[in-house]
Amino acid sequence: MPPQDRHIRNVLKLFDAHGYRHDRYSLFSDCMELCAISISNSVDSRSRTDREAHYLEIVGRYDRPAVEMFPQVFAEITMALEAAPGDVLGSIFTQLEIHNKNRGQFFTPYPVCQMMAQVTLGNADDARALIAEKGFVSAMEPACGAGAMVIALAQAMLAADINYQRHLHVTAVDIDQRAVHMAYIQFSLLHIPAHVMAGNSLSNEVREHWFTPAHILGGWGAKLAAQPRAAEPPALSLPQTAVARPSPRKPAREPQPRAIGEQLTRLCCKDWRQSEVGCRSAPIRRLLRNGG
């Protein structure tokens, strides 16, 4: 059995072991939110206070065995992505059979995402030329799900000898809050600079903003703010999987990117700066500490 499949199987066993006491749907959703908050609070000082309070509120719903399970799930997800980058959480979510078929919710198989990413990237020389001119390329995913399309694009760039951690920035949106947390976790662990939003791409409604450690520690707020709008690199438009294109009539309100850049000097998270792919242990220790 491939190492990634072994870790996915371990996650499924953990949820099965606690399914008799807790609703599986809620258990998975809360686990994803706790993991996402754990990562976010390591680097995003603007949202830390509110998310910390919500984190403790979620933990308070569960008994100790369930709380101790959450960092174990996080560790298995981390090791699965380390073994082979891919849509690990999408696979887990589907195998748990908690996706909403009535709403047409599904996760595109990762091999299909890889094929579509190759088509989207096209000639790698064009991407290199754009990077040489602007410093990076951007990708917009209006229905990101767990982030499979973006992960496949990042891997396609890596296969073309382009460092996506330095030369790709992603804006991702999904209407499902749980999907946003799943995408944010995977982007963070793969060190993809991204701004993930919970919202509706059709109406341009935005409810929450999540910035990955690679976005914050890489100074992407300042980089994006410094780009003249007319001269911004064109986005790599990823194939949509769940919703139609956003309406251009009502642009979404975005937080001022410069505010993130201004806070970079106040951030002190040495663990995340130790390697290009980020420190896996810091958010896991964070879950263990607050989980009792």
Image (spheres, rainbow, N blue to C red):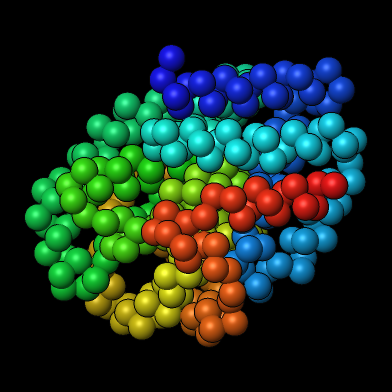
x, y percentage for residue 261? 49, 80
Q: Quadrant of residue 228?
A: bottom left
User: Taking 132 as reference, is 135 left or right?
Assistant: right
**Residue 60: in sight, yes or no?**
yes
x, y percentage for residue 202? 50, 51
x, y percentage for residue 194? 45, 59
Point out the residue furthest to the top here: 1
Please name whichever residue, 194 or 231, is drawn nearer the observer in this view of the structure: 194
Above/below status of 234 relative to 17: below
Q: Quadrant of residue 286?
A: bottom right
* Residue beneath the point at 71% across and 24% down: 15
x, y percentage for residue 98? 65, 24
User: Taking 277 as reference, is 66 left or right?
Assistant: right
* Residue beneath the point at 65% across and 48% down: 284
- Tally of numbered tags: 0
* Residue beneath the point at 78% across and 37% down: 68
Above/below status of 183 relative to 277: above
Please name whichever residue, 124 or 64, is drawn nearer the observer in this view of the structure: 64
Above/below status of 15 relative to 214: above
Q: Quadrant of the N terminus?
A: top left
User: Taking 88 as reference, is 290 left or right?
Assistant: right
* Residue beneath the point at 67% across and 19% down: 13
**Residue 246: in sight, yes or no?**
no
